[in-house]
Amino acid sequence: MSYPFPPELQQLLHEGLATGNYQSEDEMLLEAVRLLRERDDHLVRFKEKLKTRLERLDRGEGIQLDDDEALRDFFDDIQARGMQRSC
């Protein structure tokens, strides 16, 4: 499919082809569309998780941290548990 791309996109296509990572403009455009779909899917999943978590907060299921020290302790605990899992 031939399409008259704007100069900025033509430049990006030219630069992408020059890297040798793509064999054709079509290959680059297919990869770009695939990445856009992947990003969109990720965004949908993120919004679903965010909605669920906000609903939990609305129900009072969150953790209240009253000051900087409590926040540091909370993150230190998460880090320590993460280190234990990786061992």
Image (cartoon, helix red, strand yellow):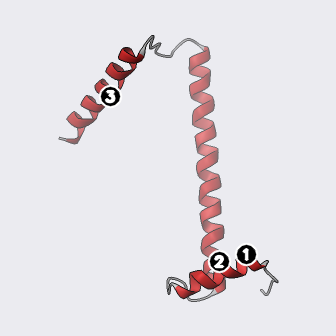
Mark pair 2, 1: CA separation? 6 Å
Q: How crowded is mark 1: few (under 14 residues within 10 Å), some or many (20 or more)?
A: few
Name the disc covering residue 78, or none: 3
Residue type pointed to by label 3 = Ile
Mark whose residue sits in front, 2 or 3: 2
Q: What element carries label 1?
A: helix
Name the disc covering residue 12, or none: 2
In the rendered image, which quarter is residue 82 located in?
top left
User: Between 58 and 3, which is closer to the camera in this rendering?
Assistant: 3
**x then y, percent, for residue 78:** 32, 28
Q: Do the residues labelled 2 and 1 touch (CB within 8 Å)?
A: yes
Q: Is mark 2 on a helix, strand or loop?
A: helix
Q: Residues within 10 Å of mark 2 (few under 14, many from 20)?
A: few
**x then y, percent, for residue 22:** 54, 84
Residue located at (60% from left, 24% from top): 54
Residue located at (63% from left, 85% from top): 14
Is 7 left, or right, of 83 in this rendering?
Answer: right
Mark pair 2, 3: CA separation? 42 Å
Dot placed on the residue nearer the N-terminal end, 3 or 1: 1
Q: In this view, does 6 lie above or below 78?
A: below
